[in-house]
Each structure stands twice: as structure tokens, then as C-alpha cells.
Amino acid sequence: MDYKLILCEKHCDGAVLKIVLNAPKANVLEAAMLEEILRVLDEIRTDKDLKMIVFEGAGKHFSFGASVPEHTKDKAAMMLKAFDGMFFELVRLAIPTMAIVRGQCLGGGMELALFCNFIVADRTAMFGQPEIVLGVFPPPASVMLARKVGQAHADDIALTGRSIDAIEGHRIGLVNLVAEEGQDAWELGLAWIEKHILPKSASSLRIANRAVRMDFFRRIMEDLPRMESLYLKELMESCDANEGIGAFLEKRKPEWKNE
């Protein structure tokens, strides 16, 4: 099947599927791209030989995140449904996942990487949840971030909106492998997969993934809908959330009313 916003590549005799976000330079996770990713995930449901799904961004950046125009009050519900649907399907598949991160990995892009079992980053990688700068918060990261890096680091990243580099990401447990200067992150990740994943049973990997991530997966399935409700029914009814999104789209400084 042809896709306009992603590329799909099979590696290692079909045991590894690489999904490339193919809308550089920003690789924005807009609704149309999320729909294509969901179509791929639906197509591989019966692929019993698949041992790893790898996400990568085309060009110099992983992803700048979800589409800001789709964060507006009238479109937020659609955006959240599509975004959360991707995570729900990945939970159901339970196939181990990896993100290959170069350059900016922000907002929804970081949330996609955050979901993955493993993150391989090169020295250019920068991770951040800048939603608070726009007066909003990241629903999936609010569920996953503390479980991945601990509450203190989650508070720092989500409440300041600052970005961290690959070295800091590795230090706090977000990043598993950091490529050396001049080393390709995909090649590093693929070598790691060949050594540690390919010798294993695909079915056993999925069962083990469900077991080791039982609480992580349960929290996604149960808490993401709660975060979606908080976002739509409380945040998007506030003055400042709409002001922050509007100011970004109008390329001006927000004027907060603190309400």
C-alpha cells in the first residue's frame, strides 16, 4: 500500500519493520500521518514473525510534534483521538518498539519516542515537551513520562518546557544508547537489535513485553482517556490555553490572564 507521509521498510528477513516519518524537515505528526501509521499497525496484526517496530524521522529531525493548528478548541478532540489511538494499537500489538532519534524530538514526537521500549539517539538529539509554553499540557507524556524517568524529571520536563540533549536523556534513563560522534544511530540500533532481539522468539517477545510493561500498558489504556477528558473539558475551556495556541499561530507573544 502506498503512503504519502510515511515510509515502511522491512529489515532482517521481515523481523524488523521500520516506519519512517516522511515529512521533513519537521515530520509533524498531523492527523493524516497518524492515520497512515494506524493503517500500517492494522496491516501487521497477523504478522507473527515481526519482532521489532522501529520509528525514525526522515531528514535531520525526528519530529517537531503534533500539528499546532490541530490543537485548537474545535479540532483538539479529533487530534487527541487519532494520537491516543496510535498508542492503544501499539499496546494491543505488544511488539517491542524502538525510536531512532536525530535532531528535534518535541511534543508528540517525544511522546512517540517515550512510548518505545528503546530509544537510540545521536549527538544532535534534543528532547522536549514544550506544550506548557503554549499554555497546554501533553496528555500522553503526563501518563508515561514519570513512569519512564521518575517524577522529579517528569516535573522538570513537563512544567518548564525545556529541552534536554541526548547525554542528559541517557543520564536520566530516557535514552538507552547514544551514538558516538559520526556514528549513525540507525546502524547502532540495528546492530543492537541483531544481537539482542533477533535470536528471540517473536511470540515470546510479545508475551514478555506485555508482562514487563503490564502496569505501563494498563496506565495508557486507563489514564489516557482521563487525560483526554481533562484536556478537552477543562484545559480547552480555559482562556489561557486558547490564548497560547492562538498566539503561536499568530506568531506573537501570549498575553496570559491566568484563567
Image (cartoon, grey):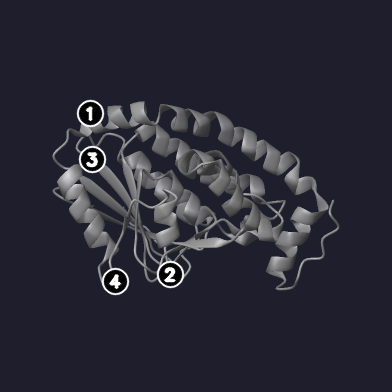
- Label 3 SS: loop
Dot placed on the residue nearer the N-terminal end, 1 or 2: 2
Residue pointed to by mark 2? 24
Depth-wise, is mark 1 or mark 2 nearer the camera? 1
Dot placed on the residue nearer the N-terminal end, 4 or 1: 4
- Label 2 SS: loop
Question: Which of the 4 image quarters holds residue 216?
Answer: top left
Residue pointed to by mark 1? 204
Q: Which percent across, then down, holds residue 74?
A: 71, 51
Q: Which percent across, then down, holds residue 83?
A: 52, 46
* Residue 14 in view (yes/no): no
Dot placed on the residue nearer the N-terminal end, 2 or 4: 2
Q: Which percent across, then down, holds residue 191?
A: 18, 54
- Label 4 SS: loop
Depth-wise, is mark 4 or mark 1 nearer the camera? 4
Q: CA distance from mark 1 to mark 2?
A: 36 Å
Are the residues tagged 1 and 3 within 8 Å (C-beta)? no
Residue pointed to by mark 3? 50
Look at 48% across and 68% down and name the residue there.
Answer: 26
**Image side of residue 257 versus residue 23, left or right:** right
Residue pointed to by mark 4? 181
Give amino acid for label 3. Leu
Look at 59% across and 49% down and name the residue there.
Answer: 79
Q: CA distance from mark 3 to mark 4?
A: 31 Å
Dot placed on the residue nearer the N-terminal end, 3 or 2: 2
Give amino acid for label 2. Pro
- Label 1 SS: helix
